[in-house]
Image (cartoon, rainbow, N blue to C red):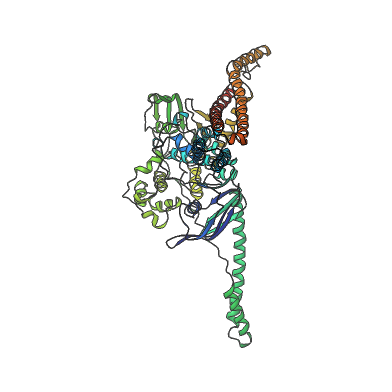
Amino acid sequence: MLAIKKLRVEFGARVLFNDLSFTVAAKERISFAGHNGAGKSTLMKCIGGVIDANAGEITKPRSCQIGYLPQEGIHISGITLWEETESAFGEAKRIQEDIDRLSERLPTLDSSTEEYMELLHRIGDLELKLEHFNPATMKPRIESVLTGLGFKRSDFQRDCSEFSGGWQMRIAMAKLFLQEPEVLLLDEPTNHLDIDSQTWMEQYLFNYPGAIIIISHDLALLDALTTRTIAFSHGRAEEYAGNYSFYLKESKLRKEILIKQYESQQREIEKTKQFIDRFRAKASKASQAQSRLKQLEKMELIEIEQDDAVMSFTFPAPPASTQSVAKLEKATKCYGENTIFSDFSFEVEKGERLAIVGPNGAGKSTFCRLITGQEEPDSGVYTLGPKSAISFFSQNHADELDPDKTVLDICTEAASRENAPVVRNILGCFLFRGDDVFKKIGVLSGGERSRVALVRMLIQPANFLILDEPTNHLDVQSQEVLQNALNDYPGSYLIVSHNRSFLDPIVTKTLEFRPGEHPTLYHGNVSYYLEKKEEEKNAAKAQAGATNSTTADSGSKVSRKEQRRLEAEIRQKRNKVLKPLQEEFEKLEGSIGEIEAAQATLTEHMSKPDVASDSAKMQEASAAYQNLSNKLEKAYSRWSELSDEIEKLEATLG
């Protein structure tokens, strides 16, 4: 489907990769691996046609469409969310417009002429092409993708300019998913998704009909999705026939084998040199020594690339903390008429390791600002421990850095006296190496500024850390550095993130926020939380909450008579609320089938010679077909709404 042949990309004197060749087959799942700056995103831009390679070529069939989602830099305005995503079906709309335009011309022509028959055939060909897009399902598909990525129905008519950068990326992702290109290129697609949207996206990608090439630092996603890994390092690319975990094991094994081969070759070289030095002066052995010298010169030397130094850092020793670090008591917080949470009590204790999850807008960031005292609750009490020292990282802190100062200056200012000498080492852990530390903040990308803000926060002595999406702009190695440092950190921390592979080893509790619901605490990591949520969902579907209740005090089972009464009540509720919707749903499915059958009959009727040659009959049939198409679109839209409604009610009623 796609072939990369002898590709070379360089920036100045630096060669990112040279003579790179590989192919992408239909429906393949490939990840690009390697540290930041190794060339992953650059290669993806080459394949996506955003930049040109210095040499080599990328070939694909003419019909093969490539879709590219960059990490950042998307700004859409002047068009509503619905119109922007609907434009994914631009080709289908153009085909329909062509059909309408040609159909208008048809009655003006003599049905006995060759021009008339030719126009009729063109309309037939276009209608066949249009059937590929299945126009009747376009609206439900758009609704499904937008709601899956976290948009509300009330967002559909909002101008795209009203959405923040993260939501702009979701708009671009939605449009790309609806286009369904044969090759999908995704550069860090999880960066701007909450845990619900990420779960939906993962399921969508598992069922995606085309090939996928992905760059991600979410190792759990890569392991679940990909079956092939191309790793970039030191200007070279190596292929691995497996997911990310397979790549880690296999690359380690390859390195060990290469080291043994290198050591063996070095021993052989040393022996050869000794022979040459010993016998080159002797006439009887001179020819042999010369022969060995030529062999040595022709030998293809095995090179061992030095891995980037495995860096690590430790947090500055935190000041002693009291048992209670911070506390909210019966706190309520509202923004206008929007209540984020009410009567909410929560205490952060010494040594707490907490993950904060939930959809965007549910209250995660609000909670962080309240628990750190940056905002006051509308009612209730906030108490900060008398010895609590807070250090807070959020994405907007990157925008507050002085653009005229260097990376090193910004971080040195924030460091403690004890930590100042190791600031450069810590910056190296987060991808600022060599002369990078002397760059002005003003010339850095958004991701680079975010990493500076993170380093600045990490080197300040504190016993209570709040990290809001700290891994968004970190490569795998930097994530491991931060993860190891947090694992050894003796203070308390709260982390807002959806990165399971990063969170699972270092958190012991998970606090979930849901719009309009009381926050829920789970005593386990994020994988534990997801398992429990799945269990809750399955339990809700399997039975009504009342049927499995037990007497609270005694623990004795509900009597059979009481159980029958409860079951009867539930049946009544189901019959009263759910049954009418199910009946409408079944009736609608029947109607959809009838409309589709009528369309098929009408299409057959329109192809008959006596109809095709009669402009009046053809015009009448075309109008009837369009009327059926409109009915079918409305039916599918209502079918989608009913499906969602019934699913929610079944989960509630059991």
* Numbered-mark total: 0
Please tell me whether residue 49 is drawn above or below residue 601 in the rendered image. below
Q: Is residue 369 left or right of residue 616?
A: left
The residue lying toward the viewer, choosing from 267 and 654, is 654
Of 601 and 225, nearer the camera is: 601
Image coordinates of residue 133 in percent, x first then y, are: 56, 38
Q: Residue furthest bottom?
A: 283
Specify whether residue 495 is in view: no
Answer with left or right where residue 1 lies relative to residue 327.
right
Query: x%, y% of residue 44?
Result: 50, 51
Q: Could you tell me if residue 315 is visible in this image?
A: yes
- Residue 557 as seen in the image, left or right of residue 179: right
Residue in front for this viewpoint, 127 or 140:
127
Q: Residue at x 41, y 52 (%)?
A: 422
| The C terminus lies in quadrant | top right
Rendered location of residue 281, percent (x, y): 58, 85
Determine the residue located farthest toward the right in the rendered image. Answer: 560
Decide: is 244 above or below 93.
below
Dividing the picture into quarters, in which one does residue 560 lie? top right
Measured as percent of width and height from the top left, residue 574 is found at 60, 17
Residue at the outermost left position: 404
Pick the residue in front: 239 or 329: 239
Residue at 37% x, 48% y is 411
